Amino acid sequence: MNREIVRFIQNRLNEEGFNLACDGIAGPKTMEALRSLAVIGEHWTRRECLAGYLQMLMGKISNPVVINGRWTDETDAMYRKLKFHYDSISGNASGPLKWPSQSEDELYKFYGKVGQHQVRLHLPYPHVLAWNPKKVVNSYSCHEKVHDSLERVLHRVLEHYGYDRIQELNLDKWGGCLNVRRVRQGSRYSTHSWGIAVDYDPSHNQLDWGRDKAVFAQPEYDKWWEIWTDEGWTSLGLAKNYDWMHIQAAAI
């Protein structure tokens, strides 16, 4: 069982009056707390108890949910929604965060070696490949240190724009994240090499386009940029007026 999920559950149980160590281990005390709840089946396994508790929480903040203890892909998505919800109300979603500068020394110091420490980001709304819109992207790899921030950004984008408007504005046109390579016409590594940069809608925000041509410079994207800057991310478009597709968790 993923320790992050267990730790989340332990924190929620403590909010209900239990006194658990939030160690990410579903040990005897955690299981005793879960089994004391009326919604948890008497003979459920450890995994079923954890799933049932997440289902119970989801029912409190959303439409009624069937509490059956079954762990499916839908349960994983449920956890991500719950985490975003509780982070938001606790203030953990506030920023801006302090990311390192984009100098290689600082990036190595903060993020480690290129291409390492990657985790899967499960997206709150479907993306499509910018160069092949028929290919749906439901998750992509990013550095573990930027995962939660990226997740908060995209949840806020969905909440503000809604999926139909996201598609109209091409905010679902994904151009890539992790890509271990050198910068164009240079020797240093691109920030993509650490999985800390993302590209969106590259066709309409090409590398050498300024605000006179890039669509991301238009007023309807103001909230998009506000959401990113709230989390401390840097837009090369806003900062340098080129490469408007590119957003990174590193200061210039």
Image (cartoon, grey):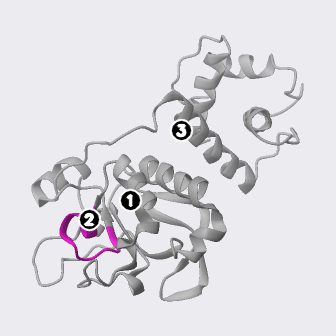
Pointer 2 with pointer 1, Cβ within 8 A: yes
Q: How far apart in space, not on screen, are marks 1 and 3 (Cα)?
A: 29 Å
Vertical placement of residue 139 versus 147, above or below? below
Q: How far apart in space, not on screen, are marks 3 and 2 (Cα)?
A: 35 Å
Corner quadrant of residue 24? top right
Q: Which residue is mark 1?
A: 225
Label ID, residue 238: 2
Q: Which residue is mark 3?
A: 4
Vertical placement of residue 42 versus 122, above or below? above
Disc 1 marks a residue whose amino acid type is Trp
Magenta range: 235-246
Q: Position of residue 148 (x, y in %)?
A: 45, 47
Corner quadrant of residue 15? top right
Q: Residue at x 18, y 54 (%)?
A: 108
Q: Position of residue 56 (x, y in %)?
A: 79, 33
Q: Secondary structure at mark 3?
A: helix
Give the total of numbered labels.
Answer: 3
